[in-house]
Image: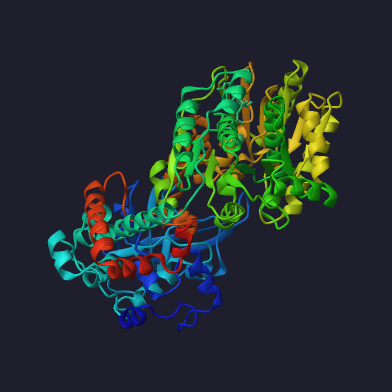
Amino acid sequence: MAKAKAAAAPPVRGWPGVGTQLAGRLVKLDIHGPQDLLLHLPLRYEDETRCARIAELRGGEPMQVEGEVTDCEVRIRGRRQLVAQIQDDTGTLTVRLLNFYPQQQKQLEPGKRVRVFGEARGGMFGFEMVHPRIRTVDAGEPLPTSLTPVYPTTAGLAQSALRKLIERHVGRVSMEDYLPEAVRARLGLMSLAEAIPLLHQPPPEIDGSALDDRSHPAWQRLKFEELLVQQLSLRKAHAARRAKTAPVLTSPGQLVRALLDDLPFGLTGAQVRAGDQIDADLAQPHPMQRLLQGDVGSGKTIVAALAMLRAVEAGWQAALMAPTEILAEQHYLKLDQWLAPLSISVEWISGSLTKKQRAAACARLETGESMLAVGTHALIEDPVTLPRLGLAVVDEQHRFGVRQRLALRDKGEGVSPHMLMMSATPIPRTLAMSYYADLDVSVLDELPPGRTPIVTKLVSDARRDEVVARVRDACREGRQVYWVCPLVEESETLDLQTAIDTHAHLESVLGELKIGLVHGRLKADEKRATMAAFAEGELNVLVATTVIEVGVDVPNASLMVIEHAERFGLAQLHQLRGRVGRGKVDSVCILMFGGELSQTARARLKVIYEHTDGFEIAREDLRIRGPGEFVGARQSGVPMLRYADLETDGELIDQARDLAVELLAYHRPVAEQIMGRWLAGRESLLRA
Ligand code: ADP
Ligand code: MG
């Protein structure tokens, strides 16, 4: 144990050269201590051991050249940019920086000698590189002898700074190998002491392709350890859940049948399947932990409502929590409409209730006079008690933090309620598995019949007039229109202003139409009144910030315009688009984009343009963003797999699974040490 303590070195902050700001950025990468730093492995490697001549440049692959800067100017015509010329004795290369710092301008002063590394493309006047990596060198400076690691990083932390930091610590920090040598020998695994330095500083003679495709034994070792930690934590969390007691929610199913009989539609096959899986869980004396995943409009609400009825019939309470007032209220109204004929009342709990209303609702829940509650996070606040809570449902669960979900769970007294999480943000299953410690997943992979396909169009901002004309046409035909303005994260005021300006503009050019406006700053009852007016058809157009993003259901709205679509996340765009296509007429979603798009922005819009399937979109999103972006997501439970791949590392997974069982049974301390190192203080989240 003493040994383990010594290995758990002090946090990064307070290390020589690591100030508060740097420490903060490292924490964003989930680097809290020196061991985390060493486990932060390269995304890929760049080969700077070779230098081409400028005349040898080819397009389409990253290459390095060295030369002297002969010219450098800041162009202000068109887009402001820095353009430099670099020359060797075979030719000239143009270097273009669209954003730049004074520091870079200095690097590119005429007369300086530089090495640039990047992808060249043929421009009008020979080859050019946009945003290459630039390094100032002395004449005759030798080339590096080993591959250069490229790390996942975060805003404000330069690749070179991170690299230097890691370089300084490799070899200085010792990583004890918790895996006994006998085990390593049996599985043919390299030691950590060998693998880690090798991955950070590959020796010159190494097989670069084995590094790149991560088949090298050093990678295998790290992937194995990562998978082992995942297996260990899954097992631990699962065991912890089995040790808890939940109410057994079985019943003859009279209420469920009564509701089904009243519904104007029949359930889809997927809804029936998910319902069966949930029922089976609810019949267990251990808490369910299930994610109901289904694309926008796949009909998750009714599945949840049926589960809630099971709880009520078994004599237990159920609560449904949603992230926004609008969404929560829609759920409330829907449940009330479904359940009132069965004489079951639903309590509405939100921040906008008066003290008196809330007290009355709380009293009815406390005495058990009311068995169902729907609300926002107000549900988890203090005055609300749900003494017989048997089932907690969380909609759009990714909008809530782990702690909020736990707070809802803890509203029950004495027992752990069953948990049903719902999400339309399609996380590929492999990702979901690593995201949550211990979670079963039901998927609604079938949309209710009668949905109309949505046609997506990409339109430049310059053609706004045509878009407005389209809005007018749609409204003349009796349709309704959403006009969505982006959320500007840095500035709520700006966000508000865009929506207000757009609203004013549309009112002036579409004088004959009724145009409403909702945004985050409105009071809850103002928002509600506007939404209701839109749902009732009293408004033709609804200008909105992203408050309508989730769950709103107005079948007559068949046109959606999204401004500055390039500023939205892909999942968000997909959710927004799902607000139309809910009625009988063909629906259209117009994505407007402003100005010149970056390459990534273009790639992202292309994805949303080409795909309608949420899962496909999520997969593409992952591909474009790369694993680095998802580091933050790891805060929620078991770390995401950073190095191993559940699809291609099947053999390692099997070995890790077997070893996890063995360690937990016979070598518990070893299991704890390994988990401790990789999870670094997040273990409490495993119990989530
Ligand atoms: P989401 O999965 O996005 O939360 P909802 O539960 O809001 O979807 O359902 C979208 C709409 O589809 C609602 O109006 C709902 O009443 C309706 N609906 C749900 N299931 C079916 C079904 N099997 N057949 C027809 N309509 C359905
Ligand atoms: Mg929903």
Side (left or right) of 23 relative to 596:
left
For residue 145, above or below residue 535: below
- Identify the image quadrant of residue 502: top right
For residue 396, above or below residue 494: above
Can the viewer see residue 444 in this picture? no
Q: Which residue is drawn at 38% across and 51% down?
A: 120
Q: Which residue is drawn at 13% across and 65% down?
A: 185
Q: In which quarter of the image is the N terminus?
A: bottom left
How many labels were placed on the picture?
0
Side (left or right) of 482 relative to 673:
right
Side (left or right) of 500 relative to 610:
right
Residue nearer the viewer, 561 or 598 = 561
Query: Which colouring convention does the figure follow?
Result: rainbow
Residue nearer the viewer, 260 or 252 = 252
Residue nearer the viewer, 485 or 660 = 660
Q: Which residue is drawn at 77% across and 45% down?
A: 361
**Percent of width and height locating residue 140:** 29, 74
Can the viewer see residue 39 in this picture? yes
Ligand 1 is located in which of the four quadrants?
Answer: top right
For residue 89, above or below residue 272: below
**Percent of width and height locating residue 603:** 48, 40
**Percent of width and height locating residue 614:** 49, 34
**Percent of width and height locating residue 307:** 55, 35
Residue nearer the viewer, 312 or 175 = 312
